[in-house]
Image (cartoon, coloured by chain):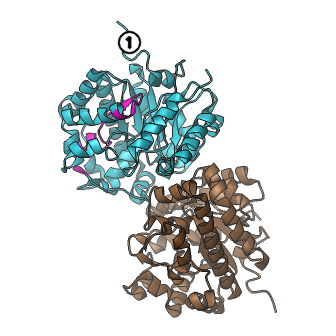
Chain colours: A brown, B cyan
Amino acid sequence: MTTPHSDSPFLAACRAEPHDRTPVWFMRQAGRSLPEYRAIRGSGSILNTIADADLSTEITLQPVRRYGVDAAILFSDIVVPAHAVGFGVDVRPGVGPVIDRPFECRADLERLRPLEPETDTPYVLETVRQVVADGSVPLIGFAGGPFTVASYLIEGAPSRTYGRTKAMMLGDPELWNALMERLADMAIASLRSQIDCGASAIQLFDSWAGALSPPVYERCVLPFSRRVFEGVADTGVPRIHFGVGTGEILHLMADAGADVIGVDWRVPLDVARLRLGPDTILQGNLDPAVCLGPLDVVEAEVADVLRRNGDHPGHIFNLGHGVLPEMDPAVLAHVVDQVHAHNRGS
Amino acid sequence: MTTPHSDSPFLAACRAEPHDRTPVWFMRQAGRSLPEYRAIRGSGSILNTIADADLSTEITLQPVRRYGVDAAILFSDIVVPAHAVGFGVDVRPGVGPVIDRPFECRADLERLRPLEPETDTPYVLETVRQVVADGSVPLIGFAGGPFTVASYLIEGAPSRTYGRTKAMMLGDPELWNALMERLADMAIASLRSQIDCGASAIQLFDSWAGALSPPVYERCVLPFSRRVFEGVADTGVPRIHFGVGTGEILHLMADAGADVIGVDWRVPLDVARLRLGPDTILQGNLDPAVCLGPLDVVEAEVADVLRRNGDHPGHIFNLGHGVLPEMDPAVLAHVVDQVHAHNRGS
């Protein structure tokens, strides 16, 4: 018996091992940009859709079929664990996560009991199992970074300034640390359960960590992200660490211990390797907004990303952030074809 | 007769000339965070408030009186010139600028005729004259960076992704360049008129330029920001260049030719000077959200900003972005006192 996906270019690139073609997948490849998603999604809360394993399996696989991407990413949301332990979370269409009673004080810690994936999120495990059974490509499991999840729980809704979150992390470090420990352990429990069910890799989405200054990130966030990566290290699956606008903290994010660093379009790949070292394995980093432009521009920008990586075997092509709802799937299909046709010079 | 404000620590710092105390002012120091502002503001469109020179003069001076800051910043908005030439702009409370008919095609250029400040924005000139007549501190005039103004005109409302804007700049460079030229010339006309009426310095707010990758910024934005700075160079007033999340393009923003570079909290001042050169004059860069935390934390973070500047004479203390509406004015007053009490080691 061979290891599942032993010939996967995605998994090879995650380990900088030789492989034939540059692998590509897209953050948010499943979801609103796809007509086949809108056709089956229904109109209720997205959390209800996620709780339906058959539906979530189908949604996870839709972009794999359409695009021929090299990995599937679980259709779920980073607030699912907090929702599942009863914190009172909803994801409002066009808005994002909203919280009934935001996290404010020590007593709120009691509302964040440890996650028991088998009983709290059985639908997630079932979706993972079903996608893995499909077997066409490796599945990436994921969790939200403790900081990004904390920011939702504290702000109560998406924020541009993270004022309450920063006030708590700076003003009440004891409470902050206790919250971050719980969220880190919740992420570990969720990730381990996904890996147990067959996920081939995991990504930690600390999407908003770039809102922090380097010293604050290092002191208040890095230890907990490191805890997450250490907490799944023994599984041996590749671990990806991603955030937006993280140029100033990229070296610290790399210190957290992931195998692959995701970068957005603000830091060219060659610049990222100058900063992090030539052996760094990178994921990214086409500006999603480029895909709203004409095809010749998309092609030129894709070529630029590939050129900046050169023939480095440690590159997973991706967007620098998620697919935008208004994006034309035909453009993404074209990007996949271009990346796959690219001669890596190997 | 002496030059006005010849003993101003703000103007001295803008030129890295000797001065007694570190100057400080705050972006958005005038406005929603002040009860005296809310008391007189009324409830109509902010553009109506700006069109009332007496009211705008009072609002501009309120924070000077309350805080003892070292500079006033004109109470206005970066979309005022586009509004004044009839493009159809409003500033919606809690939302930001919204556009009746967003900029889409070549024909829309006709809706952006050259600004004639004396007839299009006489209220701005009158406000500048009145604040200058008050004479207590130097007045900073300002304009929006061509990119940031273009992003509002194209998106039609505040955006997180700047998808339409990027699609136009990459997909139709000819139209983009024509738009940027008009907006640059509009900024020049507005800034020159403010300087003619007595503004002692100017700031170009290219707040959202950090959304761009370095190559795209260099090709599509830098030439037009440079045009603005060159267009006011002969006036001799200090020119400040500011944006948020600009770490990756800081060297390019500096290339645009301003005298002072504003940095947000993501790039520590000592790191900024390592990148831009030891003689660089900097403005910033306390994270505004820090001011929502307890006072001892605020003090520690203010001290850290001052420490990272060291005894460099080219530092204007500021926040890394605007004052938040929910901020306690007493905290900002405390920051001013701390900065002024700071021994610069000179």
> Is residue B69 found inside the magenta-colored segment of the image?
yes
> Is residue B96 found inside the magenta-colored segment of the image?
no
Q: Is residue B233 above or below residue B339?
A: above
Which span is picked out in magenta?
B66-91
B3 or B317: nearer the viewer: B317
- Circle 1 sits on which residue? B3
Residue at image coords 69%, 74%: A10
Q: Is residue B72 visible?
A: yes
Expressed as whole percent of the image width and height from the top left, the position of residue B219 reads 50, 44
Badge 1 local density, few (<14 within 10 Å), some, or many (20+)?
Answer: few
Expressed as whole percent of the image width and height from the top left, the position of residue A242 reads 62, 64
Q: Amino acid at mark 1?
A: Thr
Say which quarter of the image contains residue A218. bottom right
Q: Residue furthest front?
A: A107
A151 left or right of A173? left
Q: Is residue A331 above or below residue A51?
A: above
Expressed as whole percent of the image width and height from the top left, the position of residue A103 reads 49, 69
Residue at image coords 36%, 48%: B150
A280 left or right of B250? right
Say which quarter of the image contains residue A186. bottom right
Where's the C terminus of chain A, which quadrant? Answer: bottom right
Say which quarter of the image contains residue A71. bottom right
